[in-house]
Image (spheres, rainbow, N blue to C red):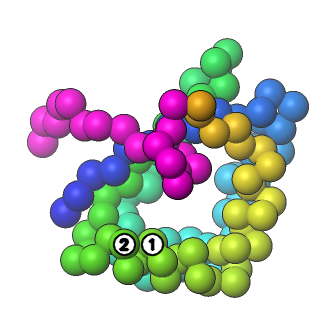
Amino acid sequence: MQRIGMVIGVRPEKLEEYKRLHAAVWPEVLAMISACNIKNYSIFLKEPENLLFSFFEYHGTDYQADMAKMAADPKTQEWWAVCMPCQQPLDSRKDGEWWASMEEVFFHA
């Protein structure tokens, strides 16, 4: 099992839309998240900075393949098309990232 943490900004004028979307995530999107071996997925909001922090556990054996599977899914692509305009990627993210990856520096089970 791998724990993943990521961060991104949310545009202030899109904050309520983002909350509304995530209060009723499409069932097909949730099913794809599960099919890609992701469990315990949460997104947290920090205001007034308008930062979104996501955390999930990856329980598969090939993270890159599962992420490619998710990215190829038409319903997920449609979901991302409505969510991405709400988001504001960090300038400090790595090349190729939308959500900036984070280093885990502490864990206690």
Residue type for callout 2: Gln
Residues at marks 1 and 2, CA–CA distance in whole angstroms: 5 Å
The boundaries of the magenta stretch are: 92-109
**Disc 2 packing (10 Å; few <14; some 14–19; many ≥20):** few
Quadrant position of the C terminus in the picture: top left
Residue type for callout 1: Met
Dominant secondary-structure state across the stretch colored magenta: loop
Q: Which mark is residue 67?
A: 1
Q: Residue at x 70, y 37 (%)?
A: 88
- Tell me: 29 left or right of 15: left
Q: Residue at x 53, y 77 (%)?
A: 70
What is the secondary structure assignment of the residue under circle 1?
Answer: helix
Cβ atoms at labels 1 and 2 below 8 Å apart: yes
Q: Is residue 32 above or below residue 1?
A: below
Q: Is residue 71 above or below residue 42?
A: below
Q: Residue at x 40, y 77 (%)?
A: 66
Report the label total. 2
- Tell me: 26 left or right of 94: right
What is the secondary structure assignment of the residue under circle 2?
Answer: helix
Q: Which residue is mark 2?
A: 64
